[in-house]
Image (cartoon, helix red, strand yellow):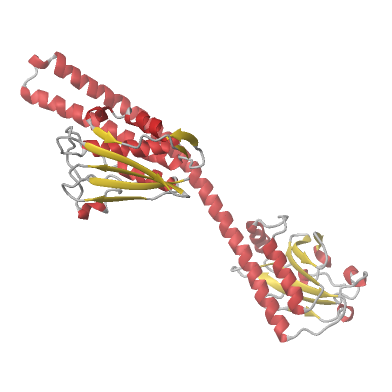
Amino acid sequence: MIKPELHHREKERLKELEAFSILDTMPEVEYDEITELASFICGTPISFVNLIDSNRQWFKSSFGKQFTEAPRELGMCSHAINHPGTIFIVPDTRLDERFFDNPNVMTDPPIIFYAGVPLMTTNGLPMGTLCVIDHKPREFSDANERALIILAKQVVKLFELRKKKLDLDSIIEQLEERNIELEKFAFVAAHDIKSPLGSMSAFSQLLLEDYNDKVDDDGKEMLKAIKWSSDRLRSLVDGILEHNRSYKFDKFTKEELILDHFIQETLRLIPSAKDVNIVYPHSDVRLEINKTALQQILLNLVSNAIKYNDSNEVEIEIGFSESEKHYHFFVSDNGRGISQQSLGKIFEIFTVLSSRDRFGGRGNGIGLATVKKLVGVMGGEISVSSQPGAGTRFDFTLAK
């Protein structure tokens, strides 16, 4: 018996093999189907997908005979990987000086015929072979050779897909770790920013109230500007944090809600809704849904319908229906409306279409972007229809 030589790029080959992280993994149907097909096409009782480690031959898939691993020095595949780019065929091992006294040839039943194709990576390194084995000598046709080579390429593609998935999983894990770090930073930064901003706003208001007669008109305007800027920046920070939290809602975390009670509870969270006529379904229909997400969506839509309404009497309607797979809602108003040119932009973050709302404030362009994100997370869609002077209607669905 002639022992196989080490591959001339053995260190690189083993390093590449390790990078695929496939050694000692569980059986997979994709590989088992290939070995079964190889035996069927080639007419052999046995077929293997094997990998050549530093001192062993490990079988990822075996058809016709169950093996887990074998000594590398006894494997014919260890010879085959030293013939890259070609199919390694031994018609009769008993007549080959390399194998005639190999224990695998002298056992019962013996390995008499062998054909193996090296599994070559894109770096030109053989990881192992796809091989077929018979207990009797035989001739291998050109069609058999072609089929085995094609199947070997499919095995390599499975290896490479696995490696890409592992690389992608690693990137995702790193991104998740960075996101956690960014979230911690954002929370700390937001707290550190909001605290002095709150003080600036409070002190500005205090100066305006307690030292009103000691500050001239220019000074008062400057204090008002400081307070307005502080309040606006605090609102912006709150909006960004809320938008970031919208990515985290779990659509599978649901609770039972009674529609009428839920809408009443939600509207109580909007102080300006007290002087507004809001029509909604007084229904005892029960919903299974993420309460926090739905409440955030309605709070944003109803608040916007109030703030950006120039009618003397604000009229808002909340509608509900359901289909087999979705809950359907709409929020419509009799406000100033939105131009057709602007409809495609309103869900873009930081897009602000109006300079001032009915209370003199200015939006930050985050609310509707958050609404769209929440609807998407909850397995639904949102659309808007509007015309200037004729009000606006938002329709959205949420998956049951």
Residue 125 is at least partly visible in this image? no
Residue 218 is at least partly visible in this image? yes
Q: Is residue 274 left or right of residue 127?
A: left
Residue 109 placement (x, y as % from top left): 91, 71
Residue at image point 90% right, 68% down: 103
Residue 285 placement (x, y as % from top left): 44, 37
State the residue in front, 387 or 98: 387
Quarter of the figure with residue 191: top left
Residue at image point 73% right, 69% down: 35
Q: Is residue 277 left or right of residue 92?
A: left
Residue at image point 64% right, 68% down: 156
Above or below 268: residue 337: below
Above or below 165: residue 42: below
Q: Is residue 16 left or right of residue 133?
A: left
Residue 312 placement (x, y as % from top left): 14, 35
State the residue in front, 240 or 12: 240
Above or below 259: residue 68: below
Quarter of the figure with residue 268: top left
Circle count: 0
Residue 256 placement (x, y as % from top left): 49, 34
Q: Quadrant of the N terminus?
A: bottom right
Q: Identify the residue at the far left of this view.
A: 217
